[in-house]
Image (cartoon, rainbow, N blue to C red):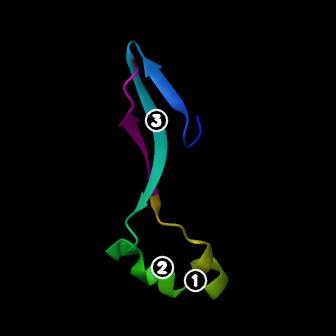
């Protein structure tokens, strides 16, 4: 399953996409982030979640 893939369930078709959100680190992780070096901080990515978008099929 990849970003932009079509998923068909019966007569319904969906587009699978990944959206990014939660650009802030959770509060419990702030102490952990302070102990990381710069390279580790730059490699952190925001949380990603899969999203299904409806795409009607004629």
Instruction: Indicate the secondary structure of the residue bearing disc 3.
Output: strand
Q: Earlier in the sequence, mark 3 or mark 1?
A: 3
Give the number of the mark in front: 3 or 2.
3
Q: Earlier in the sequence, mark 3 or mark 2?
A: 3
Q: Which residue is mark 1?
A: 36
Q: Residue 29, how many percent across, how many down?
A: 41, 74
Contact, CB < 8 Å: mark 2 with mark 1?
Answer: yes
Q: Residue 46, how many percent across, how many down?
A: 47, 66
Give the number of the mark in front: 3 or 1.
3
Q: State which quadrant residue 27 falls in.
A: bottom left
Alpha-carbon span between mark 2 and mark 1 = 7 Å
Residue at 66% over, 82% down: 39
Vertical position of residue 57 compared to residue 33: above or below? above
Furthest-left residue in this view: 27
- Span colored in magenta: 48-57
Q: Residue 33, how many percent across, how many down?
A: 49, 81
Vertical position of residue 35 compared to residue 51: above or below? below
Mark seen at residue 32: 2
In the displayed structure image, the side of residue 17 where residue 28 appears, left or right: left
Q: Which residue is mark 3?
A: 15
Closest to the observer, 41 or 18: 18
CA neighbours of label 1 inside 10 A, class few (<14), some (14 to 19), many (20+):
few
In the displayed structure image, the side of residue 33 where residue 42 appears, left or right: right
Asked whether residue 52 is drawn in magenta, I would say yes
In the displayed structure image, the side of residue 21 where residue 34 appears, left or right: right
Residue at 38% over, 14% down: 11
């Amino acid at each position: 399953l990849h970003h932009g893939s079509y998923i068909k369930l019966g007569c319904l078709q969906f587009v699978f996409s990944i959206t990014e959100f939660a650009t802030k680190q959770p509060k419990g992780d702030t102490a952990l982030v302070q102990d990381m070096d710069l390279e580790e901080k730059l490699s952190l990515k925001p949380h990603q979640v899969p999203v299904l978008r409806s795409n009607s099929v004629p």
